[in-house]
Amino acid sequence: MDPTKAPSPPPETKLHFLDYWRIIRIRKTVILAVFLLVVFTATFVTFFLPEWYSSFTRIKVERDASDIQFLNGPNYTSYDPYFIQTEFEVLQSELILGKTLEELNTNGMPNLNLSMEWGKKFNNGEPLTRPEVIKILKRSIDPRPVRNTSLIDVRVTCDRPDHAAQIANALARAYRQHRLEEKLRMTTGGIVTLEERFREHDEKVVAQQKLVDKLRVDLNISDAVATGDMPTMLMSAEALRRVEALRIESRYELVRQETILRRLRALQTNSTPIAAAHAIQSAALDTVLAESLQQLNLAEQGLLIAQKDFGPEHPNVIKSISQVEEIKQKVAQRVTGFLEGLDTKVAALREGLEKIEEEKKKAEATDISNASTSRPYFEAKRRLEDLQRFGQLLLLKIASEKIEKELPKTGMVTVIETAVPNPNAVRPNKPLNIALGIIIGLVVGVGLAFFIEYLDTSVKTIDDVERALQAPVLGVIPQNVTAMTDESIESPHAEAYRVLRTNILFSRKNESMNAMAVVSAGAGEGKSTTVFNLASIFAQSGNRVVLVDSDLRRPTLHKILHVTNSIGLTNYLLKQNKLEEVIQTTRVPTLDFLASGKLPSSSLGILSSSQMRELIRDLKSRYDYVFFDSPPIMGVSDASILASAVDMTLQVIQYRRYPQPMNIRAKQLIEKVGGNLVGIVLNNINMSQDESYYYYSGYYHDYYSKNTESEPGKESSRKSGSDKDGDGDKTKLELNKKY
């Protein structure tokens, strides 16, 4: 891997329910402690709190109305969504609470002085002031409107059940009395205002009456005119309509006669009188003229017959001509007379129409003049009538309000249920408080556990390691692991290291890579125990193994092997001894040990020498596997030097010890110096607490228990080397499949 290349971001993971359950199991001590603390505190406080008693009364609240409706009294059939809410707030006001105190002091059974009673409890025996008592009383009452009704439940809580009942009943009585007094006050005030207004109005009526009388005298209004609402007109509306109709009819007749006269004169002038006579006959205007025209027609027929039978000089012909001319002369005279009569008729119609229009105009002018002259009188008269009508309404309203005032109004506020003392305390609610304490204790405990888990950024699971470090986990080591030389070869702990050995072998790129350094980010992560047990497992498999303690500052492997550290690696690197002189044997025949030796203060950088590289090559040629224990890589440069010099590097991370960024930094240091990180060992896991690692240990226990039953001779030895934290072959199989 290129050390200069930034690591790829870890893939996002989704939490499973088992992840939450794992946190609860791991932090169960914190959860249980917080739970017990909260429950015990809630129970202790609940049983030592003073007891409070509650009593309630139910009242029915209606609009301001009398028990019976008088005349056109108020009708409150429409729904007012704000009425009950308004009265609900009034019930809690200082006005009602003050009246409640007065009611308790005067009408209580027995009389109850809350100022003295509460002063003994809350003010060292000194009486409380009225505002202080009202403030405490307001906190003691709990009015609740009953939904979709006009009922209000008033609940009072006090330290004595009889006091709670007295206060609730007194509050209901005070509210009822307040409503009645308020209604009486408003009605009385309204009547007084109406009476004052009526007196002022009566004075206006008298003054207006004087003005009307004066205007009647000044304007000379007659009795007939004064009785009406307006001046008497010379021409009534009906007469005016008849005159107008007559005028229109006369006008129409005049136009008609003029048209006939004009056309007949035109016929007389431009044609013959006979033609005019025929026109008059066609219009059936003159019966005499019609007879003359008939006679003329008969005479002309006789003339035609005579002329046909006789000659022109015949006496019959001459006589017939004479008769025709005589009749024509009569017709002409009759036409002239008819036209003269028609002309006279037209003149009469015109004169009559002019007379009608003249009389109409004269009557209208007179009516306008009379109306203008008498207008002030009639306006003053109408004003007087309006004042009189309004006065009658005021008088009727005053009378109705006085009667309304006397009517009973008990239905405005009705006490449906009277408060009675309740011997059972309502506070504290012991079952509820304890139940809440249990719930809150669980919630707070679990929440605190998850908060602590959130603050804990150390390694917790294999997924945490692989997601953060982008490196495979080759082994999972449980707690309480001792040296493999002190345990049975078939112990579950040994099997965990055999799984680690198998995965290391599969992770090698080639078989020539047999030198390994075991490093960790910080001190105390178990790398020395891990490298010792891993070397022991390799040696127990028949491989020739050498274990080198290269932690020159704090060597520990010689203590595990119970050998001396007086001579070792430093002596060889400083060329004080040969390799054969510094290598020590152990109880395992195929396992040799090279102690760290004493480190002079002048040779701190000795691991970076060429002698160290030569030692690594020499050990690789002599042994099948070479293991180096190193100091923490974050604090000392020796671990980085070893990582760059050996074939493989194994990083040990202790379960829930150091933050993840520290482990990530250690991995980056290994890669930056060119080390070959083959994988991670997750060490010191509490298998009994963390269920996510159970499959690494449960199978070990079951497997070796069965083997013990099948081989009784080996039962004692296997019992000494097994515990409940093993999972041998199953772990090896799963990790081998995974990597």
Image (cartoon, rainbow, N blue to C red):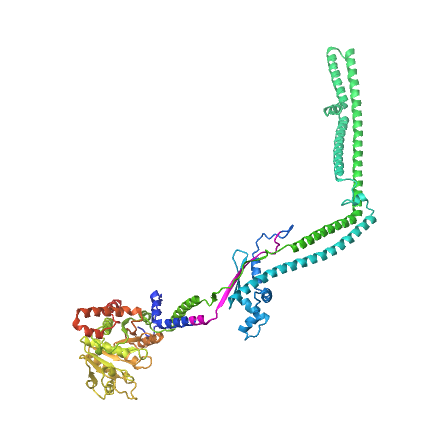
Q: Is residue 62 visible?
A: yes
- Up-down relation of residue 301 to residue 448 (above or below): above
Estimate the x, y position of residue 33 in percent, counting from the top left: 38, 73
Would residue 327 be found to the left or right of residue 71 on screen? right
- Compared to 128, does 274 lie above or below? above
Q: Residue furthest front?
A: 110
Whole-percent x, y for residue 339 in the image: 79, 27
Magenta segment includes 123: no
Image-quadrant location for residue 528: bottom left
Left or right: where does residue 101 sit relative to residue 437? right
Which quadrant of the rendered structure holds the C terminus?
bottom left
Q: Quadrant of residue 329?
A: top right
Query: Which stretch did the figure color magenta?
Result: 42-68
Image height of 257 relative to 431, above or below = above
Which residue is depicted at the point 83% across and 47% down?
220
Quadrant where the image shows the N terminus: bottom left
Q: Nearer the viewer, residue 606 or 686?
A: 686
Q: As drawn, is 228 to the left or to the right of 684?
A: right
